[in-house]
Image: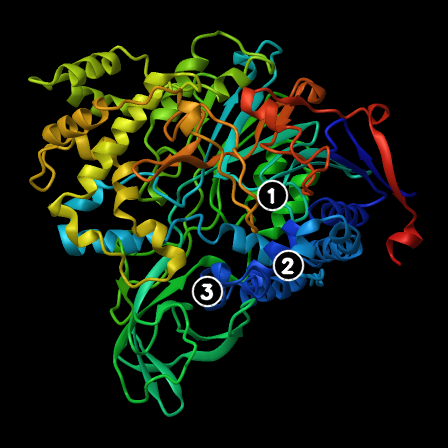
Amino acid sequence: MTTETYRDAFGIPHLRAPSARELARAQGRVTAVDRAWQLEVERHRARGTSASFLGASALPWDVFARRARLDDTARRCFAALERRDPETADWVRAYADGVNAGLAEGAARTPEFRRVGLAPGHWEPWTPLGVWLGTHILFAGFPAKLWREEAIRHLGPDAVGLFATDGPGTAGSNGWLLSGTRTTTGLPLLAGDPHRFLEEPGVYQQIRLSCPEFDVVGLAVPGVPGTAHFAHTGPVAWSITNAMADYQDLYRERLRRTGAGVEALSPEGVWQRAVRRVEVVEVAGEQAVEVEVIETERGPVIAGGPEGLGGLEGTRDPSGRPGDVDATAIALRYPPRVTEDLGFSALLPLLRARTVADVDRALDAWAEPVNVVQAADTTGAVLHRVAGRVPVRARANSLRVVPAWEKGHAWQGWHTPPHATVDDGMAVMANQRGPAGPLGVEFAPPHRATRIRTLLGQRPAWSATDLPAIQTDTHLASAAPLLARLATLTALTPEAARLRDRLLSWNRHMDADSTEAAVYAALRTAVVRRLAAHPAFAALTEPPAYPEVLLPWMSLTARVGFALEHLLAAEELFGTDRSETVRGALEEIAEAPPATPWSDAHRVAPWRALPEPPYTEPGLAGDHDCVNCTTAVPGITDLAARGPAARYVWDLDDRENSRWIVPFGADGVPGNPHHRDQLPLWLRGDLAQVVTDWTRLTLEHTDTPEESHA
């Protein structure tokens, strides 16, 4: 039997192969043809070598990747996978082989390779694990512990609760499950949208994978086989949201240099030998940088070293200082580094799943990121559970950086992932405090989840065609505290009074064509900036000496912007007069209020590995706390760097009635007809229908068994 590649009207690949292994190879090959540049960028990022062709701007990430031992962890996890689960290891190897088979063709059609003079490299069997790890290492938001440390140090422990929010750099999702009692067909529906950084090409790849064992449509992570997060096998479908669990710890280490290397002080008061090596990071157009890589019994040192927290980004003259210095650094402990397991043993069983019980069993092998999973099958059965590995340890570990030299901070096994019920025929997750509550510290505000549940309650039964309207809802409940402060203001200038009245009569929807939404956003920005500039927070305005890649979590303005609701509603805020702050902001905006709609300022701002020539991206509806979660950073920019990286509706009554969309397109090559052809639909909130009828697809490529192994 041959391996065949088909395309639908949007260029989405549909693959058919004689076995799961051949299918993995075909998936690797077609991804390399469509997304060669994206794959090579991710491979280099996982290895800490992206500055070699992207230049100095990529150096902070490369230094972090080296220090966090991402590539070494991927190698270890693959070696362990070969021992524990050789079938899955061989399946992953086949995917890497497919990438290698398609890279030359993909690179030849992709102009970015020529722009930077990059030749396509070679994918090792562990490279997909490295891509997965590099994509998700910051998902648990461990840098938030550094922020809490700074907030506590300068403002006291009460500041932690005030600034608690789904802050910068984290990722979330909307997801909901309707049982058959709440649908027009009597069988379940799943719908939602993952919120990630908007990247071009996109972070999700629509794909169909078909072989005698299974036939699955879903969203793949380019560079990783299967469809881990969102998929419909026909008999069963599943989707995820970020559980907001805390499963990574930071330890403050006491390090010293000796004649033999570096030592770290243990909880037993003993100086233990640390692993140390020096690695060289090549930087395009500049001198190479040497990075000292140190790992203690807790984990890799990601900040500082034996000389303390200075010189974090490597040094171009790495002589070091000799001596027996007792200084502090920060080490990261994360589960795959400890267990040598990234959870890849769940991927094949998920593709083979036929029931929610199959999905449930497969997810017992899931490691990270920790997710809340919803699933349903054609018998009407449903599943709502947490999947992933969260260590049992002291509460202090979850809150802040803990001292490595003190006892009581070691990991003591693993939590059992909770299962939850589906109440009133629905389960709604939007990163709020839910079934993963005991496993986390900070969660998203409940606004998105509450709004989704409210909208779902407006009809007794829903169809797949009805649900996309919920995904683009723009109601902003978090505006209430600021508007409440406005309502109390008196003795305003006439211009400010008119603007206040205008905002108080606003419908609180961040619609693309709403000028009132733009005025509200301008007022919010002014309030955030004034609060961040208050002398009470002056100590937090200077970024601490942490690696550059972690500094987004340290931005006082961003923290105030995302926590504004809490800061305005708190009984007291370090002596600040919030009503006067709002008054000053209102008077400022009233002098020249925005006269154009929200979408003029709130535009797509996708991340690209290489900067493109300037052009105006399309405007957006929505905001951070809307169901249509298009996230800017209040107080810093109205541009949306994060948002729905895909939208989907899985229909268990008829898979061909399912729907999906991504922000840009299936093809990663600029100028290709399928590079941005889904963007107009995504902007409108429309979804493309899933096509599974092979006769409606176009055959593009055929491999015989001999050709596929050439």
Q: CA distance from mark 1 to mark 2?
A: 42 Å
Q: CA distance from mark 3 to mark 1?
A: 28 Å
Which residue is label 2 attached to? 116
- Residue 575 visible in the current orientation: yes
Which residue is label 3 attached to? 68
Which amino acid type is shown beneath numbered disc 3? Ala
Residue in the image at 72% along x and 29% along y: 10
Residue in the image at 67% along x and 57% along y: 85
> Quick one: label 3 or label 1, which is nearer the N terminus?
3
- Residue 267 visible in the current orientation: no
In the image, residue 545 above or below residue 166: below
* Residue 371 percent coordinates (x, y): 48, 41
Q: Closest to the observer: 557 or 446?
A: 557
Q: Residues within 10 Å of mark 3 (few under 14, many from 20)?
A: many
> Quick one: label 1 or label 2, which is nearer the N terminus?
2
Which residue is label 1 attached to? 362
* Residue 437 percent coordinates (x, y): 35, 38
User: Quadrant of residue 627 in the image?
Assistant: top left
Q: Secondary structure at mark 1?
A: helix
In the image, residue 296 above or below residue 4: below
* Residue 362 percent coordinates (x, y): 60, 43
